[in-house]
């Protein structure tokens, strides 16, 4: 894809609000959200010529960059030391959450293109099933079904991954 000013402006107008919504839903600090949205857009524009439309839609490519930047944000985030004598309660959040996020990204990339696009449009872009149907040129029922199949495939992959990681964690304890 060429890097013309008009194309970059179109991408900015179309995707900035969607990227901002996605990031804001995952990061509480408003200043960090704004910084990350700017970083994501700069990365998109810097690598725009590398985008290959034969590998997926522009929105899928942009949301992959967005997702990876959010993951990187949490990986780089420093934690504060715990107060002396603090005993954390057990949590349901697994110690291997980063690996699960990586597996989710991997599973999403492995979905058939229509399922991946439907899932990305629904969960990341915040579109309704009706909007997805219009955008993809399919019926409302088909959009719901494709999205449902994609989510089921992701759940199955993550269930197997978490079982594997749990067994691995128990072996190393």
Image: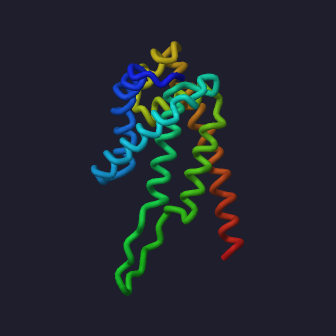
Q: How is the image coloured?
A: rainbow
User: On the rendered image, what quadrant is the N terminus found in?
Assistant: top right
Residue 79, located in which quarter of the rendered image?
bottom left
Q: What residue appears at the point 38 percent right and 78 percent down from the top-left corner?
A: 82
29 and 160: which is toward the camera: 29
Q: What residue appears at the point 38 percent right and 82 percent down from the top-left corner?
A: 86
82 and 158: which is toward the camera: 82
Residue 61 lies left or right of residue 123; in this view the side is right
Seen in the picture, residue 97 relative to 123 is either above or below; the reply is below
The extreme left residue here reads 30
60 and 141: which is toward the camera: 60
Residue 165 lies left or right of residue 44; in this view the side is right
Q: What residue appears at the point 41 percent right and 37 percent down from the top-left corner?
A: 41
The extreme bottom residue here reads 85
User: On the rendered image, what quadrant is the C terminus found in?
Assistant: bottom right
Residue 85 location (% of width, % of height): 38, 86
Q: What residue appears at the point 34 percent right and 45 percent down from the top-left corner?
A: 24
Residue 122 location (% of width, % of height): 46, 31
Seen in the picture, residue 132 relative to 101 is either above or below; the reply is above
Residue 119 makes an appearance in the image: no
Residue 6 location (% of width, % of height): 39, 19
Residue 43 location (% of width, % of height): 46, 40
Residue 134 lies left or right of residue 35; in this view the side is right
Seen in the picture, residue 167 relative to 149 is either above or below; the reply is below
């Amino acid at each position: 894809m060429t890097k013309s000013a008009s194309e970059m402006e179109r991408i900015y107008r179309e995707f900035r609000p969607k990227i901002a919504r996605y990031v804001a839903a995952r990061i509480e600090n408003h200043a960090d959200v704004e910084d990350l949205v700017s970083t994501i857009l700069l990365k998109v524009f810097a690598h725009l010529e590398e985008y290959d439309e034969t590998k997926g839609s522009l929105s899928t490519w942009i949301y992959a960059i967005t997702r990876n930047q959010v993951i990187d944000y949490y990986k780089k985030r420093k934690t504060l030391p715990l107060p002396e004598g603090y005993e954390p309660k057990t949590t349901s959040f697994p110690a291997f959450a980063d690996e699960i996020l990586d597996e989710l990204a991997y599973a999403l990339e492995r979905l058939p293109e229509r399922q991946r696009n439907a899932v990305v449009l629904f969960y990341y872009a915040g579109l309704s099933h009706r909007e997805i149907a219009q955008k993809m040129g399919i019926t409302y029922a088909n959009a719901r079904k494709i999205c449902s199949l994609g989510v089921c495939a992701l759940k199955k992959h993550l269930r197997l991954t978490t079982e594997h990681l749990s067994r691995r964690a128990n072996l190393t304890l």
